[in-house]
Image: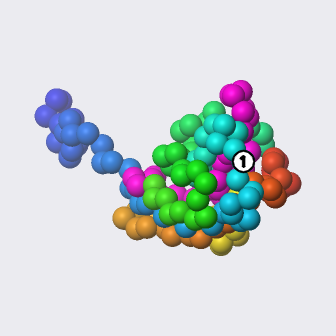
Amino acid sequence: MAAALLAACDQGFAPPDAPPTGAIMVDITYENYPEAWPESEDIYELLFVALRFVPEDTTDFLQLNRLVFSDRLQFHVAQQTVTLDSVAAGVYPYSGVAHKYGPELFDWRPIGLVEENGGVLVVSSGEITRVSMSADFLNPPPFPPPDAP
């Protein structure tokens, strides 16, 4: 009986294959540079974030297993390129630059969203998905998005 079970299992006790991953490379241009940038003390954090869903409010950002985010972005620059490596392959329908503007947990807002391809990033295994976007502290996109459920 045990021999039959072991014969049926062709991988034995090997760990499962790692999920397929790709990368995201984003070229960000900050509109109205330098006058639009807030003072450094008003920028608690600045990240590029890609979500596997369209958020309904800031509490959705607690779904850490359904989003990926960059290291801290540079402050007071006209443009920058950020790369996120080892991103799970799949569809990310809401992505952009997130600005933490205060000390509270949910003091976040987008200051720019990816608009290429209808705003949808598709990460393919072994490939780099590259997009360009703009971010604007003075004219942030509405949040939550108007088409959120």
x then y, percent, for residue 26: 54, 64
Specify whether residue 27 is painted magenta.
no
Other residues around mark 1 within 10 Å, as few (<14) / some (14–19) / many (≥20):
some
Specify whether residue 94 is painted magenta.
yes
134 vs 127, left or right, is right
Asked whether residue 113 is in view, the answer is no
Q: Identify the magenta region.
A: 85-110
- Above-or-below relation of 25 to 38: below
Kindly identify which residue carries mark 1: 38
x then y, percent, for residue 135: 69, 60
Q: Quadrant of residue 13?
A: top left
Q: Secondary structure at mark 1?
A: loop
| Residue at image point 33% right, 48% down | 18
x then y, percent, for residue 87: 45, 53
x then y, percent, for residue 74: 54, 52
| Residue at image point 80% right, 56% down | 138
- Which residue is more in the foreground, 56 or 40? 40
Residue sitting at the far top? 104
Residue sitting at the far left? 3
| Residue at image point 83% right, 53% down | 142
Residue sitting at the far right? 146
- Which residue is more in the foreground, 95 or 14? 95
Q: Amino acid at mark 1?
A: Pro
5 vs 51, left or right, is left
In the rendered image, the quadrant that contains the N terminus is top left
- Which residue is more in the foreground, 104 or 43? 43
144 vs 84, left or right, is right
Q: Main secondary structure of the magenta part?
A: strand
